[in-house]
Amino acid sequence: MNPSGARTGPNLCFRLSCWVLGLVAFVQLLAAGVALAIRLEASREVVVEERIVTRLVNVAPESPAAAKPDPVVALPPVPELVAADPLPPARELDAPAIADPRVERLVTEAREARVAEDMGKAIVKLEEARAKDPDEPNVHFELGMVYETMAAFDPSLADKAAAAYQEVFQMGTTRAGALYPLAARKLRDGISMPTDMRGKLALGRTRIFKDDRFPDGERVVLTIPVRAAPGHEPKPEDFMVAVHFFDESPQGEVMNALGEAAVAAQATIAWPTAPIDWLGGEEAMRVTYTIPRATPADEHLFGRRKYYGQVVELTYKNELIDSQAWPRHLASRSRVEPAGRQDPVFLDEDLNFDGSLLPPLDDEIPLEPVLPPFPAER
């Protein structure tokens, strides 16, 4: 074995290993350089990314120097707001005064005549006043009142009443004052006729209570209902209920109790349902009739009178609307024949009139009519 060859073998291996390691290191360095170059090249590219960001930005107001100057205008100073006081209530309308004293005197006399139911005198006074002052509202309104009152007896006068109220209405509140709303109400509601209330205003069934425990004589309490149809409730001053009491004497004679001054009987009237507002369509009147106890001497001489019955009359604007009598035969003693309650009498055609049974003439009213006897049964 050659000793020199033995030394060359290990050196060659050593050298080859160094060259291999060096080559590997060079390759790694080259790879690292290439990778670094690629990263540097990639970092040089510009990447654009769009994003929408909502953000509240406070913008500073524009400076006065930069803003456009406003024109100079002279404005009045603004008054301070003060709490307004409530408005005063509306002043009520006054009745117009009559300028001419002569016309005022005539209107006053006409009103007095109308209240006294002297319509002829009232019209004469008002016509004279209208001739002196044709534009006086008091004259026209008073004429309307007179004609409206007379229309209860002559319906044709209702048109004259409406014409008089129309004259007042056309004058307005400036000239007619408080008479304007009154005339307007008359024209709106129409001229009411008393006969229009028949069937709409009536008496109910009278309830009679005899107080047997009354120690000072005889006392009777009547409860009289007055009924009104819906929409036809009259005012208290437009209707009246009158009661006529009748007593029976010891001799059996029926007489008007309150019509004789010698009789000390008394009647008191009260409305338990007052005020009259027609709640439920009915109002009740209570009449207490008292016959005081007579002295022993008067009772011995004249006897003792006692309550017999009554006639109740309902009037609307002085027109009889309804009446009730108890006992019923007292209806013939009322001042006016009951309206709408006259039963017809049917006579036999074969009946022959003779003597006192002759029928009355057209202008003759029999005081005591006599009815013929009933025919005999067949």
Image (tube, grey):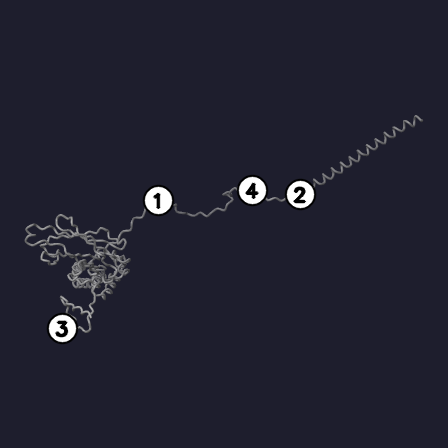
Q: Earlier in the sequence, mark 2 or mark 3?
A: 2
Residue at numbered disc 2: 47
Residue at numbered disc 1: 83
Q: Earlier in the sequence, mark 4 or mark 2?
A: 2
SS for callout 4: loop
Q: Earlier in the sequence, mark 3 or mark 1?
A: 1
Residue at numbered disc 4: 55
Q: Is residue 44 left or right of residue 84?
A: right
Label disc, if present, on residue 117 of the rendered structure: none
Residue 27 percent location from the top left of the image: 79, 36
Residue at numbered disc 3: 354
Q: For the residue carrying disc 2, how many other residues have a C-alpha within 10 Å: few (<14), some (14-19), or many (20+)?
A: few
Q: Residue at x 13, y 73 (%)?
A: 354
- The residues bearing labels 2 and 3 have C-alpha atoms spaced at a distance of 145 Å
SS for callout 3: loop
Q: Earlier in the sequence, mark 1 or mark 2?
A: 2
Q: Marks 1 and 3: in contact by CB < 8 Å?
A: no
Q: Indicate the quadrant where residue 262 lies.
A: bottom left
- The residues bearing labels 1 and 2 have C-alpha atoms spaced at a distance of 70 Å
Task: Please tell me which residue lies in front, 325 or 64.
Answer: 325
Inspect the image, locate mark 4, and give the three-letter code of the amino acid beneath it: Arg
The correct choice, above or below, for 316 with respect to 361 in the image is above
